[in-house]
């Protein structure tokens, strides 16, 4: 564990009990977040990226969800064993959370100002006056004009982009050391998305907050993140610095993801190379590599045993048997 | 396949000065589409882009006659939308199909896949049950599903599979023209590429014409021959794809292009970005003048008073901006 490491997740396994059986949503995920950096978690729907993020704040409903094993350490303190009351002190003040859909995650019956101040609810030592001051200050920081009026308004009076700014304000008002952003721009238009991403970048510089950014959009990852974790079928398949992931891609899945996005410089005559098939069924996850069924390079060992993490270069890990010293040399093709 | 120059292309769909207004309250009129004209040529893919609320879906729905335009007319293959009898209407429905945005709400959850896909054939071709079964099987094969799926209900499928069912339904009546209203935005990245490829292959095989509505510009660039950019109910720019991306003229198009996130860290940090002020204003009771003026970095006095006309700059590159002259 490096000294600046704020959050350390080790071998996290989280499942849900359902009528159909136990869904293993997250299976042995480990990564660290250092102070002030931006870590992107990328993957398709159902890969466990949102569940992982919500585990950090224990936001997954328990039951039906439950921790099977692993640990989440924040400043060296174990999160998993904390009670609900203890978690309330952490949520918002230590770790903030920006939800995906600003339209549904704000309370429609509460004024904007009150919703932001709600973060201080379990902190009676902060006076009413100070709460309001901080709420107004943060609203100004996220670029909302006419703050005094907005403070008294209800969510339905704001546009989508404005609501997402309020969500960001709410996540940052407690001055947390980490903010988890779960697809914060997915429901927004491109020009508004660009504004929000720039805002996050600017605020991070000013406040020194670490950001865990969850998205399925590789373009957003390229723009915002320092480090990237690629998830598939509840596992991390590749992690590394953003340049390593994009330019020294190690895992066939990461490569497949990059290939299936039409790039702007792509000629129209070039055919896209989609990843064939569909993601694995997490009721009975495959024993071996989760991607083996869709992987064009899959070998016998891939279906039988989960590959360990191989270190390709400093800090760049890849869980793929192709990286084993005895594996055949394969060049991943990029179009 | 050789591409014909534009002058030789014959228009399949002509949208002529179409308006679609909605009365939202006593005094509030929402001008979803305001005096829009463009042509769609036979065999091409026309991309229609813009942000939410710009009227792109409304246009698509007007073309397939799900909405009646408030004024103006849409001519399909020489026949105006205004004067159609029942016979012609039925014929039109066979030739023009639509693929909807949301694969979860656009399939009837009480019908099996066979019923969903076969419904159009039963109406238009009066096939027997055995013929329908055979055709549905063929269609399922084309879109990458198989005959086992025929007796299942929509809830048994994933989003990508449902979208394929929607595409099979559109293809069932041998259409000439398909309006694709954001057909891939509800799908995962790796599935998106599968559907895009399929749409492209089908176009080549069946000589289809597409109107491809989307907000994702990199996808639109990849699939379209020409692109129409809309903002708040009006067209701001029409051009061939390559021309639009290499030489965007309207300030809105330029900022839209610069806002696309690129999946390349070096390119992403090197790119010049044009940030827009504020957000899209409410489309209800719009002020006169250029709708984009409020957010435009180049707006001057004139833009707030006089709305610009869509002018051809040669080569079919049309722009609606006072500065573009």
Image (cartoon, coloured by chain):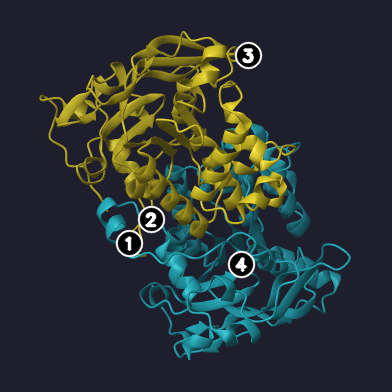
Chain colours: A yellow, B cyan
Can you identify the residue that label 2 sits on?
A: A262
Whether discs 3 and 1 lie on one chain: the answer is: yes
> Which residue is located at x 53 percent, y 47 percent?
B143
Chain letter behind tag 3: A
C-alpha gap between disc 1 and disc 4: 26 Å
**B149 sits left or right of B19 in the view:** left
Can you identify the residue that label 4 sits on?
A: B177
Can you identify the residue that label 1 sits on?
A: A266
Chain letter behind tag 2: A
Residue A305 appears at what percent x and percent y? 28, 16
Q: Are marks 2 and 4 in contact (CB under 8 Å)?
A: no
Question: SS at mark 1?
Answer: loop
Q: Are marks 3 and 4 in contact (CB under 8 Å)?
A: no
Q: Nearer the viewer, residue A119 or A46?
A: A119
Residue B57 appears at what percent x and percent y? 65, 62
Q: Are marks 3 and 2 in contact (CB under 8 Å)?
A: no
Chain letter behind tag 4: B
Q: Are marks 1 and 2 in contact (CB under 8 Å)?
A: yes
């Amino acid at each position: 564990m490096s000294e600046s490491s704020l959050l350390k997740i080790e071998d996290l396994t989280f499942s849900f009990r359902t009528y159909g059986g136990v869904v293993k949503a997250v299976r042995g995920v480990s990564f660290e977040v250092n102070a002030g950096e931006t870590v992107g978690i990328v993957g398709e729907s159902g890969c466990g990226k949102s569940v992982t993020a919500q585990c950090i704040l224990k936001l997954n409903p328990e039951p039906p969800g439950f921790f099977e094993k692993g640990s989440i350490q924040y400043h060296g303190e174990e999160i998993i064993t904390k009670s609900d009351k203890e978690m309330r002190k952490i949520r918002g003040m230590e770790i903030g959370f920006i939800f995906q859909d600003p339209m549904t995650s704000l309370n429609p019956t509460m004024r904007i100002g009150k919703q932001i101040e709600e973060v201080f609810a379990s902190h009676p030592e902060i006076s009413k006056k100070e709460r309001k001051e901080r709420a107004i200050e943060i609203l100004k920081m996220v670029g909302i004009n006419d703050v005094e009026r907005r403070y008294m308004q209800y969510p339905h009076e704001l546009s989508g982009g404005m609501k997402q700014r309020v969500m960001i304000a709410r996540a940052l008002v407690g001055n947390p050391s980490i903010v988890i952003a779960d697809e914060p721009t997915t429901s927004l238009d491109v020009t508004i998305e660009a504004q929000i991403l720039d805002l996050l970048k600017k605020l991070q510089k000013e406040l020194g907050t670490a950001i865990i950014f969850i998205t399925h959009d590789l373009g957003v990852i390229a723009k915002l993140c320092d480090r990237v974790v690629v998830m598939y079928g509840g596992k991390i398949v590749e992690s590394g610095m953003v340049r390593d992931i994009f330019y020294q891609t190690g895992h066939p899945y990461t490569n497949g993801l990059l290939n299936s996005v039409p790039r702007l410089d792509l000629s129209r005559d070039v055919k896209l190379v989609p990843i064939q098939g569909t993601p694995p069924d997490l009721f009975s996850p495959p024993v071996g590599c989760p991607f083996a069924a869709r992987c064009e390079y899959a070998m016998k060992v891939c279906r039988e045993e989960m590959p360990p993490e191989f270190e390709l270069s400093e800090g760049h890990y890849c869980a793929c048997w192709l990286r084993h010293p005895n594996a055949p040399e394969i060049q991943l093709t990029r179009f | 396949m050789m591409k014909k120059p534009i002058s030789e292309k014959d228009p399949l769909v002509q949208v002529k000065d179409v308006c679609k207004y909605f009365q939202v309250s006593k005094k509030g009129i929402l001008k979803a589409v305001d005096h829009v004209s463009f042509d769609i040529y036979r065999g091409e893919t026309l991309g229609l882009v813009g942000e939410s609320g710009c009227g792109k879906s409304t246009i698509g729905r007007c073309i397939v006659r799900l909405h009646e335009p408030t004024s103006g007319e849409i001519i399909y293959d020489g026949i105006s939308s205004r004067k159609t009898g029942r016979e012609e209407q039925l014929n039109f429905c066979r030739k023009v199909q639509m693929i909807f945005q949301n694969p979860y709400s656009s399939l009837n959850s009480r019908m099996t896949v066979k019923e969903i896909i076969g419904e159009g054939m039963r109406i238009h071709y009066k096939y027997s049950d055995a013929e329908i079964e055979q055709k549905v099987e063929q269609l399922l094969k084309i879109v990458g599903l198989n005959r086992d799926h025929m007796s299942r209900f929509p809830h048994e499928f994933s989003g990508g599979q449902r979208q394929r069912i929607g595409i099979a339904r559109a293809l069932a009546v041998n259409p000439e023209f398909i309006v694709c209203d954001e057909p891939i935005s509800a799908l995962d990245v790796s599935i998106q590429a599968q559907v895009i490829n399929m749409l492209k292959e089908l176009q080549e095989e069946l000589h289809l014409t597409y109107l491809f509505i989307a907000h994702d510009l990199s996808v639109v660039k990849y699939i379209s021959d020409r692109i129409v950019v809309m903002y708040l109910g009006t067209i701001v720019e029409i051009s061939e794809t390559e021309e639009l991306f290499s030489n965007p003229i309207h300030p809105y198009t330029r900022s839209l292009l610069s806002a696309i996130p690129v999946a390349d860290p070096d390119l992403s940090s090197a790119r010049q970005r044009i940030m827009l002020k504020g957000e899209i204003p409410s489309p209800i009771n719009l002020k006169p003048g250029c709708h984009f003026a409020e957010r435009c970095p180049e707006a001057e006095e004139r833009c707030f008073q006089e709305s610009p006309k869509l002018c051809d700059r040669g080569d079919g590159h049309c722009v609606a901006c006072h500065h573009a002259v």
